[in-house]
Image (tube, rainbow, N blue to C red):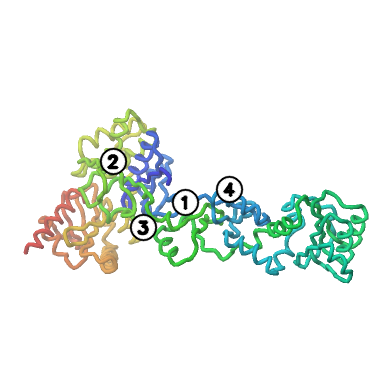
Amino acid sequence: MNDNIYITGHKNPDTDTIVSTLAYADLKKRLGYNVTPIRIGNINSETAFILRKFKMTPPPLFYDIKTRVCDIDFDYAFRVNPDAMIKEAWEIMRANDKKVIAVVDKQDHLIGMATISNITSGILSSTLKNYDLIKRIPLENITASLNGELLVNPRHYHPNGIINITTSKLLEQESLSYKDEIVITSNRPSSHLHAIETKAALVVACQTKEVTPEVILTATKHNCAIITTPYDIYTTSLSICHAIPIADIMSVNLVTFNYYDYLDDVKAIIPKSRFRSYPVIDNENVLKGFISRYHLWGHEKRRLILVDHNETNQSIDGIEQAEVIEIIDHHRVGDVTTDIPIRFRNEIVGSCATIISKMYKEYDLEPDKDMAGILCGAIISDTMNFNSPTSTVDDRKIAASLAKIANIDLDDYAQEIFTASTSLAGKGISEIVHNDLKEFNMQSFKVVIGQINIVDSESIIDIKDQISEFLDDLCMTSHYDLALMIFTDIYKKGSYFIWTGKDKCLLDLAFENLTIDENGLYYVADLMSRKQQVVPALARAISIYHNK
């Protein structure tokens, strides 16, 4: 298991969650941790502008944090190339107490797999006249397995797979033919010549280093190979079978798993299969190792740090399979649970980026110019340039210090940010709704609330019906009791509402100053914060609704 820690913000990420993810990853790395910042949604136009301005790259997109094969420890795969002899594979397996070996090419691409069963059956079946295995053994393999020397290497080696052993008694049978056979003989020249002259494919001369010139000449003339070996006849007959190429007995119909497969999927497949070990490969079919049943349980979980949220329905899919080790947030306390105590930092400030900026100082560190620039942008964005009721003195102080590091003017920067984020022109309905969409569970109610900044109500008049239809579909497909879209006018310092769902009366209970303007838009004055003004008001309304 590697020591990597993933850091993520919430779904449908806004600027604060993306910047907090990047900044906390930077801080953790500077403190010596191995971390990976990730995001679980597309970035919006405002965030894209801020990152682009300071030449920062967004975190990679993840769809879940479920445990994958690459997250667990599995066995190293001992391997041989397809030309290797059974003997070589067996020796590697025996030396490492393994029952399986992989067969790979020069680039480590998986070709097959051989087990002890493959090897033993290959050797035994060859003694039961499975001639095909023997006839395919290269002369070089036989020579190597016999610790011998190839004296005659014919242009056309033509064995039929039969191994024969000559004796002095057999030599008396002059009519006996060894055509295309591998003949194992003693060191007697007469035995060599008889086998050659009866058209043997190979003569193996045992317990000798040389043969007579006449034997060499005759073998060359008859296209017969000659190998000498120090081994006796019995050892030679066994060793030839050990020279079978591993490719000839390996299994190729394999059950393999990808390095990035979900462990849940692997657990579903392995119990239905009969193998003990399964190759793990990457997307290029490069062998990574072997996985077995015992690897599937008792493994460590992926470690996860949450920033800018602490509710499971807002977090990454598969969070229940991860180990949450830390939370940095500025929202209400949600439902994330852990098995052990963790560091949970929750402060009443307008931006999570404010908390992380404080943490740099606490470690006597300072963000670089670009990091300070995006941190400052996140604070401006989440506090609506300090106009939101969630904004605090800490937000202002931290933003001012970051602006000095980044060499920017706060008011000018805020104007740039709002210009980049408030225009709805060119944005699709889905993009507008999902710009900053969060799900909340309030007692038995499932509520989803989106928010986007605008500069005037004119921008939403023509699309209000489309927004309402989109929210209707959202309620139907995701089973929400209430879907609410907030359009916050940053200059008027109030918000327009478009909502739908079976419990729309909740908004009347939640907001006493809810009005309808001349364009048929619902409006609440002095409302800018979803976190501090909308969510608590809805929660109270739901409580009243329940008690009726």
* Tag 1: amino acid: Phe
Q: Quadrant of the C terminus?
A: bottom left
Of the residues under marks 3 and 2, which one precedes in the sequence?
2
The spot of residue 76 in percent (x, y) is 52, 49
Please indicate, yes or no, whether residue 184 appears anywhere in the rendered image. yes
Label 4 environment density (alpha carbons within 10 Å; few <14, some 14–19, many ≥20)? few
Q: Nearer the viewer, mark 1 or mark 3?
A: 1
The spot of residue 180 in percent (x, y) is 81, 67
Q: Secondary structure at mark 3?
A: loop
* Tag 3: amino acid: Lys
Q: Quadrant of residue 341?
A: top left
Of the residues under marks 4 and 2, which one precedes in the sequence?
4
Q: Nearer the viewer, mark 3 or mark 2?
A: 2
Lateral position of residue 416 relative to residue 246, left or right: left
Q: Which residue is mark 3?
A: 427
The residues bearing labels 4 and 1 have C-alpha atoms spaced at a distance of 19 Å
Q: Which residue is mark 2?
A: 379
The residues bearing labels 4 and 2 have C-alpha atoms spaced at a distance of 61 Å
Q: Which residue is mark 1?
A: 74
The residues bearing labels 1 and 3 have C-alpha atoms spaced at a distance of 47 Å
* Residue placed most toward the observer, 471 or 1: 1
Q: Nearer the viewer, mark 1 or mark 2?
A: 1
* Residue placed most toward the observer, 67 or 387: 67
Q: Nearer the viewer, mark 4 or mark 2?
A: 4
Q: Which mark is residue 95?
A: 4
